[in-house]
């Protein structure tokens, strides 16, 4: 069964970026995940398809109205229920949410599906968050013009963790953050490039040595660039596989 991903957005076409290109495009074509878009305008109660209004209390910009958003979310919930998914997690993309990391992507990938809610303008009516949203997720401490790019970041990071998405299943277990470290350096042909050569160990054919070198490189890079990750790693301990290196 595909991973079911429902998205509530005023800009459906933006999601072509993930359904038509690269790894996620292939996963979509191979039915590893399925994307269903819900446009709040289709749930507006007037012929102008209005979905926003000025904020109570004054202030700049517009706010997305509760009604069309809630109706769209309920329709998404019903679709997932019809597919046998009883209680789908509704995620609102907002800078006020908990920062997305590998652990959260992994957690979401283990569920059968998600509903992603994308805001625009100054934000959405707070009552939708209280009534419908389970989790608020941010992709970083900056403000985007809407939740769509953030939703695509969530979908990409989740879909690549679903078995079958990556051609070589080892890719998902080797990349950055999976073992709490940054990735090791990669090289491909030619062996010599502008006076710079590929490290000898990678040409040695000795798998154990290569594994050990990669772990050393990953540790060194993490120590230099993201020492905060090493603190976490110290707390969580090294894996059984790492102990053998
Ligand atoms: N919407 C606007 N900015 C955002 C951010 N940083 N993360 C998630 N959703 C957002």
Image (cartoon, rainbow, N blue to C red):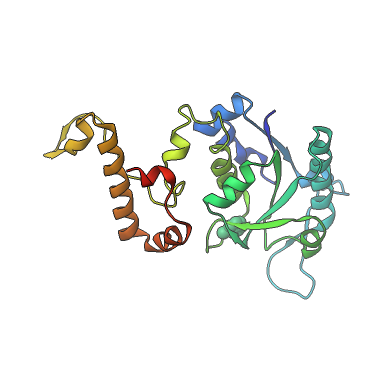
Q: Residue at x 29, y 42 (%)?
A: 212
Compared across the picture, whether 43 is left or right of 168 comes to: right
Q: For the view shown, which residue lies furthest in the right direction?
A: 45
Residue 17: x and y in percent read: 55, 37
Residue 125 in sight: yes
Quarter containing the N terminus: top right
Compared across the picture, whether 138 is left or right of 50 comes to: left
Towards the viewer: 44 or 159: 159
Residue 217: x and y in percent read: 28, 48
Above or below, comparing residue 125 to residue 101 in the picture: below
Q: Residue at x 55, y 28 (%)?
A: 164
Compared across the picture, whether 195 is left or right of 85 comes to: left
Answer with the quarter of the image where residue 34 lies. Answer: top right
Residue 225: x and y in percent read: 34, 59
Residue 50 in sight: no
Residue 112: x and y in percent read: 70, 38
Above or below, comparing residue 119 to residue 168 in the picture: below
Q: For the view shown, which residue lies furthest in the left direction?
A: 195
Q: Residue at x 68, y 70 (%)?
A: 60
Q: Quadrant of ligand 1?
A: bottom right
Towards the viewer: 166 or 241: 241
Quarter containing the C terminus: top left
Towards the viewer: 77 or 71: 77
Compared across the picture, whether 112 is left or right of 182 comes to: right
Q: For the view shown, which residue lies furthest in the bottom direction?
A: 57
Answer with the quarter of the image where residue 97 lies. Answer: bottom right
**Count of numbered badges drawn on the protein:** 0
């Amino acid at each position: 069964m595909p991973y079911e991903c429902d998205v509530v957005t005023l800009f459906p076409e933006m999601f072509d970026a993930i359904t038509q290109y690269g790894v996620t495009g292939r996963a979509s074509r191979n039915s590893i995940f399925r994307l269903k878009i819900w446009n709040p305008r289709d749930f507006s109660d007037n012929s102008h398809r209005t979905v926003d209004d000025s904020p109570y209390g004054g202030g700049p910009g517009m706010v997305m109205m509760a009604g069309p958003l809630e109706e769209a979310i309920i329709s998404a919930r019903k679709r997932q229920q019809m597919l046998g998914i009883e209680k789908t997690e509704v995620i609102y993309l907002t800078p006020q949410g908990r920062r997305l990391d590998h652990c959260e992507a992994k957690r979401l990938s283990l569920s059968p599906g998600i509903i992603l809610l994308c805001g625009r303008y100054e934000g959405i009516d707070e009552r939708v968050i209280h009534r419908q949203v389970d989790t608020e997720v941010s992709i970083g401490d900056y403000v985007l013009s809407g939740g769509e790019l953030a939703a695509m970041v969530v979908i990409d990071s989740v879909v690549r963790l679903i078995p079958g998405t990556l051609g070589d299943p080892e890719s998902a277990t080797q990349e950055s953050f999976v073992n709490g470290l940054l990735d090791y350096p990669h090289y491909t042909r030619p062996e010599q490039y502008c006076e710079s050569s590929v490290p000898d160990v990678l040409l040695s054919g000795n798998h154990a040595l290569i594994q050990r070198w990669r772990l050393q490189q990953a540790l060194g890079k993490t120590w230099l660039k993201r020492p905060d990750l090493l603190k976490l790693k110290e707390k969580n301990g090294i894996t059984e596989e790492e102990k053998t290196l």
